[in-house]
Image: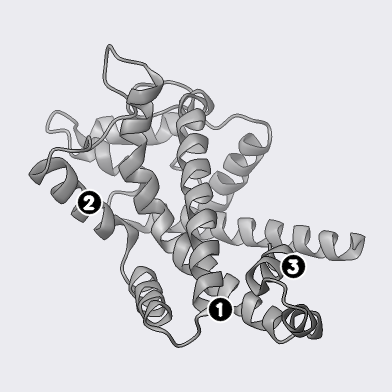
Amino acid sequence: MRGFLLNRLSQSLILLLIVSVIGFLVLNLLPGGPLAQFGLDPGMTQDDLDRLKEQLGLNRPLLMQYLDWAWRLLQGDWGHSFRDGAPVLAVIGRHVFATLLLMGTSTAIAIAIGTWIGIRGATHRYSMFDHVATVGAMVALSIPTFWFGLVGIYIFSLRLGWLPAGNMYTIGDGSVLNYLHHLILPSIVLSLVHVAIWSRYMRTATLDAISQDFVKTARAKGLSERRVIMKHVV
């Protein structure tokens, strides 16, 4: 077990290193480089851009820039935001609660609905419900999540006016119900793909459990097959 965890950890570290190198190279190879947004300012001259490059150390070789960035990252110095100059870690910290709340809610919805769909699809194999669930999972996995978000905003926010289109809460109203009202649409949208994945997993696991001898024995004794499967799978 320890060897497995160490192997997974080493793979994750290597993957993070590769992703960081690729992201760093892409940022520097784009037209304008890291200072592209400053180049959009009509009042910014080439001399100003050159001065910024020197101040930020962007006139050094890419290898030196990357090593300096990685060392500062490991030390907890993630730099400052270009937008307001605030420390990046502080900006991230202000949004951690909202992120965890949204991801936790969408995950809970996905597990609850996906488990029910997967088990029902397996116990009613090749039924209309199973076919619809399979097609729905394929659609959810094939369409980008942001498209579902745009459709949800158009239908439930713009057309029907049932749900807010953004923000975490209404300014001046920080009640729990207001938080939940704003949480409904984004959490459901984010859970769609996870529902598809979880339902397929639960269907496969349930079909495997149904073929086990203990389920056949329980069925022969008149016990509820669904209850036995739920206890074994979940």
**Is residue 37 among the parts visible in the rendering?**
yes
Residue 150 in percent (x, y) is at 21, 52
Q: Nearer the viewer, mark 2 or mark 1?
A: 1
Marks 3 and 1, how far apart in space? 14 Å
Q: Which residue is mark 2?
A: 152
Q: Secondary structure at mark 1?
A: helix
Residue at the (29%, 35%) spot, across then down: 49
Closer to the chain start, of discs 2 and 3, is: 2
- Please determine whether, in this image, residue 179 is positioned above or below residue 144: above
Marks 2 and 1, how far apart in space? 32 Å
Dot label at residue 123: 1
Judge from the rendering whether residue 162 lies leftward or rightward of residue 102; answer left or right: left
Return the residue nearer the eye: 135 or 10.
135
Dot label at residue 100: none
Closer to the chain start, of discs 2 and 1, is: 1
Specify the amino acid type for callout 2: Gly
Dot label at residue 232: 3
